[in-house]
Image (tube, coloured by chain):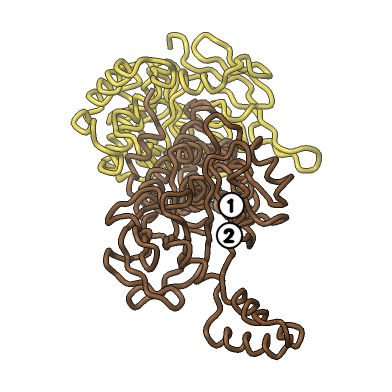
């Protein structure tokens, strides 16, 4: 038996292809939306993976350092290091800010880290690691910086000595790594005017500037201008140790919050990007409904254009299932063309998105199945119309 | 007349109920022998189309009896459960317009019927090519319907009607869109095919050009048929 659907598609391939391209662009948008969500999840996972930590120790009762602000004294890591099962512990700071790159502003996450400790960039694609204690930086290539470029962070200029890749914040902003001390200063230190004003206020406070207590005022002022805070302590556990078993005593005895990798992933994926995920899900549902409506409309219109032929087919004894199969195959054919166009177009335009778009093969398979199901459902309207055609209409009168 | 291709006895068709009842067919009696072409003539509203739909098993008559070959297919009710198979295998249709399937080429338009009946594609296409040769359009076998002239399309439609070698062909105004020469050519072909394939052909027509070619004519008026001899002019 010949394929009536296939012949019809070949006969009017131009109409099919153009319709399929239109549908494909819509499917491409749907795939891209899914890719945006996957990209957000991947950004979060990459952030955790790149930190090289098994446990994140943060301020008590916070979801820091990525989902909420967190501030710890920078000597807290010493106490953590002494806990059972801890192999390494290092301070780290995170600061989202806008930096100038050439003529444009770039939104980045400035990471303060200690070289050789957890939190440093995992690998470099160009240049070298930071070897000096101050004013050197390593940046993700997406910042647009090149080796040797100067980057201004707060009051100081840093020299770009290395470039890395896929080092982004949970929000997708590329990272700039600088030495911890510089980062603490950039994040917590006040500007000069504020320091002068603060000193004047402290000196004017009689309880802080007591006569007969030499050195008190200077000590207070020194503490106000020094920066002794970090956002988190990244912990690596000893081989064979269970991260949760190591984290529990830290929470209990150090009055700090300690999150394992699984818990941190839960915070980032389930909490931080939950609203965005719902937003994207809504878009996906709407796009799916629109796609179904378009396929239904197109197939229905095409079927109405063939009413006379369908009446003749029915009159000459064609089975209803053959006619239904023809319409269903056409709908699926349209969906297939649409999916191929959508897959290609989404792959072509995804790299131009400002944030990471991750197109997973598994998502493509799921989308293909969904497109086919949607097309099959959408064809029911046209099938119903075709099956209601009276074969007697082929006979005049 | 040796036997009959189709025989209709006391066929009636009533539409509606109560005050809206319409007797479209009151008393139809017809007999067409294998290889014979008869004309069915009548004014608008006389019941021609209703009769054609009843004969074509598209609508169910109200009463009467229809026999196809030696099998009773209707006797105050259908005696055959699969009417689609009946239409596909045992009744050929030729319409006023050819109504060829535009997305199939000429061969497959004809081969579709045997394929629908379950014949292998190769055998179905072979049958189609034989018919096309018999109808002098073998050279157009791979053409699309839109590439054919009106006369060629109508010949292909006749070939399609003959594809499953049905005992009867119902032709509904097959010459209406054609000029005299082509109309007579179609009748000539129908006569030749009817003889060649032993098929009974009923031609519903208004066409004054072809009426003199029938040897027998059934007039239908107010749902009742009346048989009379035709001129039987050679074409």
Q: Which chain is brown?
A: A
Question: How far across and how far down the image is residue A298, in percent?
Answer: 49, 49
User: Farthest residue in the right direction?
Assistant: B18
Q: In the shown orientation, is residue B198 left or right of residue B149?
A: right
Q: Helix or strand or loop: what does disc 2 sit on?
A: loop
Q: Measured along the vertical axis of the image, is residue A185 above or below residue B118? A: below
Nearest the viewer among B101 and B91 is: B101
In this view, the residue in front, A232 or B154, is A232
The reply to whether residue A155 is in sight is: yes
Residue located at (58% from left, 32% from top)? A241
Q: Colour of chain B?
A: yellow
Under circle 1, the secondary element is helix
Neighbour tally class for label 1: few under 14, some 14-19, many 20 plus, Cα within 10 Å: many
Q: Please tell me which residue is depicted at 53% across the width and 61% down the height of the picture.
A: A93
Can you tell which mark lies on residue A56? Answer: none
Q: Position of residue B103 (x, y in %)?
A: 35, 38
Q: Residue at label 1?
A: A77
Q: CB under 8 Å between callouts 2 and 1?
A: yes
In the rendered image, which quarter is residue B100 located in? top left
Number of marks present in the image shown: 2
Q: Is residue A379 among what the camera can see? A: no
- The x, y position of residue A313, in whole percent, is 46, 32
Image quadrant containing the N terminus of chain A: top left
Circle 2 packing at 10 Å, graded few (<14), some (14-19), many (20+), is some
Q: Which residue is mark 2?
A: A74
How far is disc 2 from disc 1 in space, using C-alphas? 7 Å
């Amino acid at each position: 038996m010949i394929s009536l659907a296939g012949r019809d598609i070949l006969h009017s391939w131009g109409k099919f292809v153009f319709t399929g391209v239109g549908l494909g662009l819509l499917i491409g948008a749907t795939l891209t939306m899914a890719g945006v969500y996957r990209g957000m999840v991947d950004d979060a996972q990459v952030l955790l993976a790149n930190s090289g930590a098994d446990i994140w120790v943060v301020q008590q009762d916070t979801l820091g350092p990525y989902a909420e602000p967190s501030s710890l004294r920078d000597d807290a890591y010493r106490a953590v290091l002494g806990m059972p099962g801890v192999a390494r512990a290092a301070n780290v700071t995170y600061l989202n800010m806008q930096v100038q790159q050439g003529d444009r502003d770039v939104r980045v996450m400035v990471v303060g880290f200690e070289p050789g400790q957890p939190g440093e960039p995992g690998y470099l694609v160009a240049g070298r690691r930071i070897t000096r204690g101050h004013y050197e930086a390593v940046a993700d290539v997406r910042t647009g910086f090149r080796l040797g470029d100067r980057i201004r962070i707060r009051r100081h200029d840093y020299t770009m000595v290395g470039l890395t890749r896929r080092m982004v914040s949970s929000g997708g902003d590329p990272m700039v790594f600088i030495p911890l001390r510089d980062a603490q200063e950039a994040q917590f230190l006040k500007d000069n005017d504020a320091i002068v004003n603060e000193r004047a206020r402290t000196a004017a406070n009689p309880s802080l500037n007591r006569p007969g207590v030499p050195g008190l005022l200077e000590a207070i002022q020194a503490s106000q201008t020094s920066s002794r805070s970090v956002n988190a302590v990244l912990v690596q556990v000893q081989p064979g140790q269970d991260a949760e078993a190591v984290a529990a005593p830290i929470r209990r005895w150090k009055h700090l919050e300690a999150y394992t990798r699984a818990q941190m992933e839960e915070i980032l994926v389930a909490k931080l990007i939950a609203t965005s995920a719902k937003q994207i899900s809504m878009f996906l549902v709407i796009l799916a409904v629109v796609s179904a409506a378009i396929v239904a409309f197109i197939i229905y219109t095409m079927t109405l254009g063939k009413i006379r032929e369908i009446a003749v087919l029915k009159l000459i004894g064609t089975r209803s299932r053959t006619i239904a199969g023809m319409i269903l195959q056409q709908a699926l054919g349209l969906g297939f063309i649409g999916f191929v166009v959508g897959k290609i177009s989404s792959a072509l335009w995804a790299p131009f998105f400002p944030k990471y778009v991750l197109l997973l093969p598994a998502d493509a398979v799921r989308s293909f199945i969904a497109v086919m199901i949607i097309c099959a459902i959408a064809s029911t309207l046209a099938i119903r119309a075709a099956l209601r055609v009276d074969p007697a209409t082929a006979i005049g009168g | 007349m040796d036997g009959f291709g189709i025989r209709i006895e006391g066929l009636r068709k009533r539409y509606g109920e109560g005050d809206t009842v319409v007797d479209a067919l009151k008393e139809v009696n017809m007999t067409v022998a294998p290889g014979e072409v008869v004309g069915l003539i009548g004014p608008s509203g006389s019941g021609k189309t209703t009769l054609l739909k009843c004969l074509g098993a598209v609508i169910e008559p109200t009463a009467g009896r229809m026999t196809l070959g030696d099998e009773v297919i209707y006797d105050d009710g259908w005696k055959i459960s699969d009417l689609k198979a009946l239409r596909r295998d045992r009744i050929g249709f030729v319409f006023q317009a050819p109504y060829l399937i535009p997305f199939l080429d000429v061969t497959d338009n004809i081969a579709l019927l045997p394929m629908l009946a379950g014949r292998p594609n190769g055998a179905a296409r072979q049958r189609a090519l034989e018919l096309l040769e018999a109808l002098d359009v073998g050279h157009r076998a791979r053409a699309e319907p839109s590439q054919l002239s009106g006369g060629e399309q109508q010949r292909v439609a006749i070939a399609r009607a003959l594809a499953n070698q049905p005992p009867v062909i119902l032709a509904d105004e097959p010459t209406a869109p054609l000029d005299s020469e082509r109309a007579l050519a179609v009748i000539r072909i129908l006569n030749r095919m009817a003889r060649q394939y032993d098929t009974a052909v009923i031609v519903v027509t208004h066409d004054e050009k072809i009426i003199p070619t029938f040897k027998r004519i059934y007039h239908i008026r107010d749902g009742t048929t009346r048989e009379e001899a035709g001129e039987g002019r050679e074409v």
